[in-house]
């Protein structure tokens, strides 16, 4: 197949334009932020569930099989942690979804505030910034 006979393939072979590349990178950043927010929300729910499980399940008694040793307490703590992570990954009790939505709302608000401050920044940069260098402070004091 000759490319000269298929001009419709030329756009596929040319490198992406900078705006298209920037849009693709922004989309990847957005999905990465969403994935990070989802992971953080699930970790928060797992932490909460672990705390609940530790309070619900009694500590082993000294006359039990393990004797209530430190090793048994540590093992039970790790078991509660695993139970909590599994519960959170499988949907948990809904805390992760609420936290995830709140994180996305806060991220969007932060991005809007950053865009507004970027638009206002040139006005603020017109003002001279005083120098904090000791020689400059001495000259200002005179």
Image: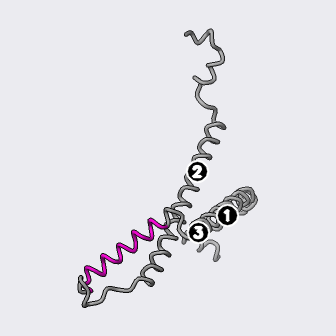
- Mark 2 and mark 3: Cα distance apart in space: 22 Å
Neighbours of disc 1 within 10 Å: few (<14), some (14-19), many (20+): few
Q: Quadrant of the C terminus?
A: bottom right
The residue wearing badge 1 is 105
Decide which of tag 1 and tag 2 comes sooner along the chain: 2
- Mark 1 and mark 2: Cα distance apart in space: 14 Å
Q: Position of residue 81 (x, y in %)?
A: 40, 72
Of residues 124 and 93, the one drawn nearer to the viewer in this rendering: 93
Image position of 13 (left or right of 76)? right
**Count of labels in the image:** 3
Does the magenta segment cover residue 82? yes
Q: Quadrant of the N terminus?
A: top right
The main secondary structure of the magenta stretch is helix
Magenta span covers which residues? 68-87
In the rendered structure, find residue 94 and report the number of the disc placed on it: 3
- Mark 1 and mark 3: Cα distance apart in space: 17 Å
Image position of 46 (left or right of 31)? left
In the rendered structure, find residue 31 and report the number of the disc placed on it: 2
Q: Is residue 60 above or below residue 137?
A: below
């Amino acid at each position: 197949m000759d490319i000269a006979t298929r001009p419709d393939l030329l756009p596929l072979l040319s490198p992406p334009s900078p705006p298209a590349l920037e849009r693709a990178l922004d989309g990847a950043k957005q999905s990465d932020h969403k994935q990070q927010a989802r992971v953080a929300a699930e970790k928060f729910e797992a932490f909460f569930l672990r705390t609940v499980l530790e309070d619900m399940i009694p500590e082993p008694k000294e006359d039990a099989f393990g004797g209530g040793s430190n090793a048994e307490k540590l093992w039970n703590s790790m078991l509660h942690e695993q139970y909590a992570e599994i519960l959170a990954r499988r949907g948990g009790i809904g805390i992760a979804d609420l936290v995830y939505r709140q994180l996305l709302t806060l991220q969007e608000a932060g991005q809007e505030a950053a865009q507004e401050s970027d638009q206002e920044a040139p006005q603020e940069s017109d003002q001279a910034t005083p120098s904090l260098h000791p020689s400059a402070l001495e000259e200002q004091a005179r």
